Image (tube, rainbow, N blue to C red):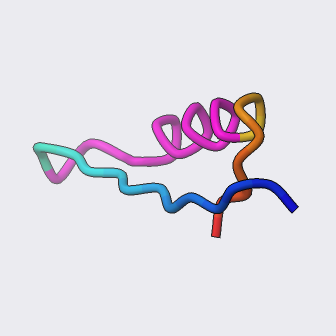
Amino acid sequence: MGHRAAIYCRVSTADQSCERQEFDLRAFAGCAGYDVV
């Protein structure tokens, strides 16, 4: 089991989405050896 991490996504306007940001952060966490909880 690797290190555990949480992802926090935010947007500044109602018409934006966190989907791409979450995808990129999950990929980064995986490459860095983190388990997203």
Residue at the spot x=70%, y=32% of the render? 32
In the displayed orientation, state which residue is furthest to the bottom: 37
Q: Left or right: where does residue 4 sit relative to residue 12?
A: right
Examine the image and state in which quarter residue 25 appears: top right
Q: Left or right: where does residue 7 sit relative to residue 10?
A: right
Q: Which residues are magenta?
A: 14-29
Q: Left or right: where does residue 6 sit relative to residue 13?
A: right
The x and y percentages for residue 4 are 64, 62
Examine the image and state in which quarter residue 12 appears: top left
Quadrant where the C terminus is found in the figure: bottom right
Camera-nearest residue between 1 and 36: 1
Residue at the spot x=69%, y=56% of the render? 3
Query: Is residue 31 depicted above or below 9 in this figure?
Result: above
Query: Is residue 12 depicted above or below 36 in this figure?
Result: above
The x and y percentages for residue 36 are 66, 60
Query: Is residue 6 depicted above or below 19 in this figure?
Result: below
Camera-nearest residue between 17 and 3: 3
Total numbered badges shown on the rendered structure: 0
Residue at the spot x=80%, y=55% of the render? 2
Residue at the spot x=40%, y=48% of the render? 18
Q: Left or right: where does residue 14 sit relative to residue 23?
A: left
The x and y percentages for residue 14 are 16, 53
Quadrant where the N terminus is found in the figure: bottom right
Camera-nearest residue between 17 and 7: 7
Q: Could you tell me what secondary structure mostly forms the magenta stretch? A: helix
In the displayed orientation, state which residue is furthest to the right: 1
The x and y percentages for residue 31 are 76, 29
In the displayed orientation, state which residue is furthest to the left: 12
